Structure formats: structure tokens, C-alpha cells
Image (cartoon, rainbow, N blue to C red):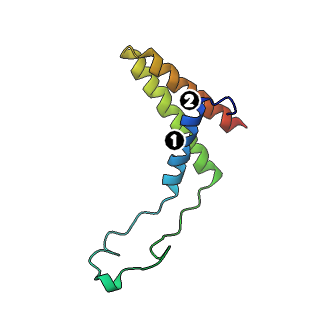
Amino acid sequence: MKSRDRAAVSALRATLSAIDNAEAVAVDDGVRQGLAIEQTPIGAGAAEAERRVLSEADVERIVRAEMAEREAAAVEYERAGHTDRAAQLRAEARALAASAMG
């Protein structure tokens, strides 16, 4: 990353976001709706929910899914004649594979 590898940075940022999203807890639809102003939580962190804790296997599954998504998109871009975008997606998939291996 010291060489400012844009493909690696892009792929890692997107994958970290996917992991962060997977840690999110679904909000109950009826829990906070319709509360009067005096009943709403106040203060920093008052409405925060505890995040899910992902296992190593969960994180690995997410990384593999991100790699597969990039490979599939690269095939589609290639079919459409956008070889430059396909090459970028493949470089991102390789960066994810390299970071997953160590």
C-alpha cells in the first residue's frame, strides 16, 4: 500500500464497509417509532445498539464474496467491451486475495 495501489485501497475500503455492515444489528420496526419528543433517547450513544461479533469464518465468507463479486463484474464488463474496468476489478480481486492470505 505504500506505493498507493488504488485497486488495493478501493477493494479493502469496500470490503471493510461490507464487514462493518454485516456487524450491524437490524432495527426493530416498532421499537422507537411514534415516541413523543420527551420519550426519545438523549445524549451521545443513547440510541446505539450493540454490534454483532463476526467469527473469522464470517469475515472470510465476506471477503470471498467480495472477490467473487468483482470477478463476476469483470466478466460482464469484458463482455461489454470495457476491458479497462474489467482489469481494475480483477486487480481489486487479486488485492483482496493477497490480503486474505497474509
Circle 2 crowding by C-alpha within 10 Å: few under 14, some 14–19, many from 20: many
Q: CA distance from mark 1 to mark 2?
A: 10 Å
* Residue 32, horizontal then vertical, whole percent: 34, 75
Q: Nearer the viewer, residue 79 or 88?
A: 88
Residue 43 higher or lower than 76, as above or below: below
Is 11 left or right of 47, judged from the image as shown? Answer: right
* Residue 36, horizontal then vertical, whole percent: 28, 83
Q: Identify the residue shown where x is 65% and y is 51%.
A: 56
* Residue 55, horizontal then vertical, whole percent: 62, 55
Which amino acid, by three-letter code, is at mark 1? Ala
**CB contact under 8 Å: marks 1 and 2:** yes
Residue 49 higher or lower than 6, as above or below: below
* Image quadrant where one finds the C terminus: top right
Q: Which image quadrant is residue 7 in?
A: top right
Q: Identify the residue shown where x is 67% and y is 33%.
A: 1
Q: Which image quadrant is residue 11 in?
A: top right
Residue 63 higher or lower than 39, as above or below: above
Determine which residue is flagged by label 2.
92
Mark identifier at residue 14: 1
* Residue 23, horizontal then vertical, whole percent: 52, 57
Q: Identify the residue shown where x is 47% and y is 33%.
A: 69
Circle 1 crowding by C-alpha within 10 Å: few under 14, some 14–19, many from 20: some
Q: Identify the residue shown where x is 70% and y is 36%.
A: 101
